[in-house]
Amino acid sequence: MRAIVFDYYGTLSNPAGESERRELYSRTGEVLGIDGGVFWAAMVDSFRERIVGAYGDTRATLLAMARHCGIEPSDEVLTAALQAQIEGARQTQRPRPDAVKTLTALRERGFRLALMSDCSSELVEDWPNNPFAPLIDAPVFSWRERVRKPASALYAAAASRLGVTPADCWYVGDGGGRELRGAHDAGMRPVLVTNAAHPEAAQHRADPDEHIPDHSVDDLPELLDLCGWAA
């Protein structure tokens, strides 16, 4: 095994951040003049469209959500909402403990690393500022690719951009979006991140996976042993 493909949310990011997402989105809604709960519902309902780029970039998405909620924001208000959304997104994207250290160690061992995320525009637009960006050889975003997990095209893109075959890849994720089944069917070796220390995180998985892979870890540092003996 020469490469590892990582999911982002709940895998590289701190699982605790998912519990904060509603509050953070609600703040954006309030800046737009929309009840926080109403705006949150609009964002949840549009998730599958947002992560494949249906509404465009973050500013365009916020405008579309505001109009959906019956609000026509001024440019000034939209700019303020955009800043609130970026700041909130960064909170949900923050690394889980030891994640940066673990990926650094994996690179030092010769592994090529990819990211494959079902994500909306915020992660893509702010990726150059993300602490994982220098460690990832091939970022693959559903928003940019216009398709979401478990589409085989995403797994093929990750392997191709790493310069390896799918059979050369581990796939590491918490099981959202049926990603582990997708990895298995694509020819990768899936690893479930159980997030045993964060049981509340499971409720935030979209379209959870029923596939139980042969390998699992409770937290990312365990990959250093798993990827060593099972290479």
Image (cartoon, rainbow, N blue to C red):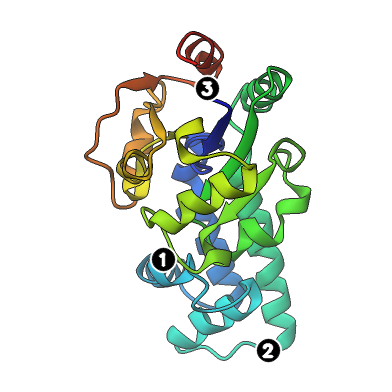
**Pick the front one: 141 or 44:** 141
Q: How far apart are marks 2 and 1 (CA)?
A: 24 Å
Instruction: Answer with the quarter of the image where residue 164 lies.
Output: top right
Instruction: Give the mark nearest the N terminus, 2 or 1.
Output: 1
State the SS at label 3: helix
Q: Distance between the residues labelled 3 and 2?
A: 44 Å
Q: Which of marks 2 and 1 is in front?
A: 1
Instruction: Answer with the quarter of the image where residue 175 lies.
Output: top left
Q: Name the residue under label 3.
A: 220
Is disc 3 in contact with disc 2, using a CB cutoff of under 8 Å? no
The amino acid type found where label 3 is placed reads Leu
State the SS at label 1: helix
The residue at the far left in this view is 210
State the SS at label 2: loop
Tell me, yes or no, if residue 93 can be seen here: yes
Left or right of 32: which side holds 46?
left
Residue 35's spot in the image, x, y percent?
46, 72
- Please name the residue shown 72% across and 86% down the image: 75
Q: Count residues near mark 2 (Cα–Cα under 10 Å), then give few for <14, some for 14-19, many for 20+.
A: few
In the depicted structure, whether residue 231 falls above or below residue 84: above
Instruction: Give the mark nearest the N terminus, 1 or 3.
Output: 1
Q: Nearer the viewer, mark 3 or mark 2?
A: 3
Q: Mark 1 points at which residue?
A: 47
